[in-house]
Amino acid sequence: MFLQIKNHLLSFITLDEDEFLYFSDKLSIKKLKKKEILLQEGNICQYAYFVNKGVLRYFYNIDGEEITGQFFFENNWYTDYESYLREIPSKQTIQALEETEILMLAKKDLEHLFLKIPKFEKFGRIMAENAFLGLRMRTEMFTNQTPEQRYIQLLQERPKIAERIAQHYIASYLGIKPPSLSRIRKRIFDNR
């Protein structure tokens, strides 16, 4: 059950068996159905989530329209950092796009891990750095690229999205409407 997360952790930090068992005792497992909401906008995010199987997306509801912020596949962590750290209501909704299994680590347990096993502070720092870099890359993508360039980059760097995510969510993620994405896809495939 915990082999996947164990291998993931070991790619960043060294843990002996006792340390891993202490960590894994803090995890809870949750299974989500396709389209099920994990965290609703307005609730406080109290967990860090590890995607064991499936895919999550977070989105914002802007004037009744869902604007997708990101997708998280197997072996990815996700939390709404602002809500999690500041203990304020989330502005995001987190939803499963497939049948999804997640491992949940409560904030209080993570803080206790930082004290009990300081190696986890290093892991937490690495995750925060990765989150920052992801946001920076997304900002640069929207600032410096056309929608077509964004889509091509997405196909090259994250092919899982094109394989597993519905086109209307991809369009939302790219900041365009579905008909625009259809035209972009037609141009790209006609030019091959």
Image (cartoon, rainbow, N blue to C red):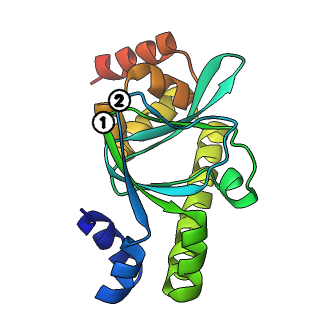
**Residue at image coords 47%, 25%:** 169
**Mark 2 burial class by Cα count in 10 Å: few <14, some 14-19, many 20+:** some
Query: Between disc 1 and disc 2, whose residue precedes?
Result: 2
The residue furthest top is 179
Label 1, label 2: how many angstroms apart (C-alpha)? 5 Å
Residue 118 shows in this picture: no
Report if the CB atoms under discs 1 and 2 are less than 8 Å apart: yes
162 displayed left or right of 105: left
- Classify residue 125 by image quadrant: bottom right
Identify the secondary structure beneath mark 1.
Answer: loop
Q: Amino acid at mark 2?
A: Lys
**Residue at image coords 36%, 36%:** 161
> What's the mark number on residue 54?
none
**Residue at image coords 43%, 40%:** 56
Place of residue 190 in the rendered image (x, y in percent of width and height, measured from the top left)? 30, 16
Place of residue 139 in the rendered image (x, y in percent of width and height, measured from the top left)? 65, 45
| Residue at the spot of label 1 | 99
**Height in image: 34 above or below 88?**
above
Residue 142 shows in this picture: yes
Camera-side residue of 50 and 68: 50
Q: Quadrant of the N terminus?
A: bottom left
Place of residue 87 in the rendered image (x, y in percent of width and height, measured from the top left)? 73, 55
**Height in image: 73 above or below 66?**
below
Identify the secondary structure beneath mark 2.
Answer: loop
176 displayed left or right of 64: left
Q: Amino acid at mark 1?
A: Glu
40 displayed left or right of 155: right
- Classify residue 134 by image quadrant: bottom right
- Classify residue 159 by image quadrant: top left
**Height in image: 40 above or below 101?**
above
| Residue at the spot of label 2 | 34
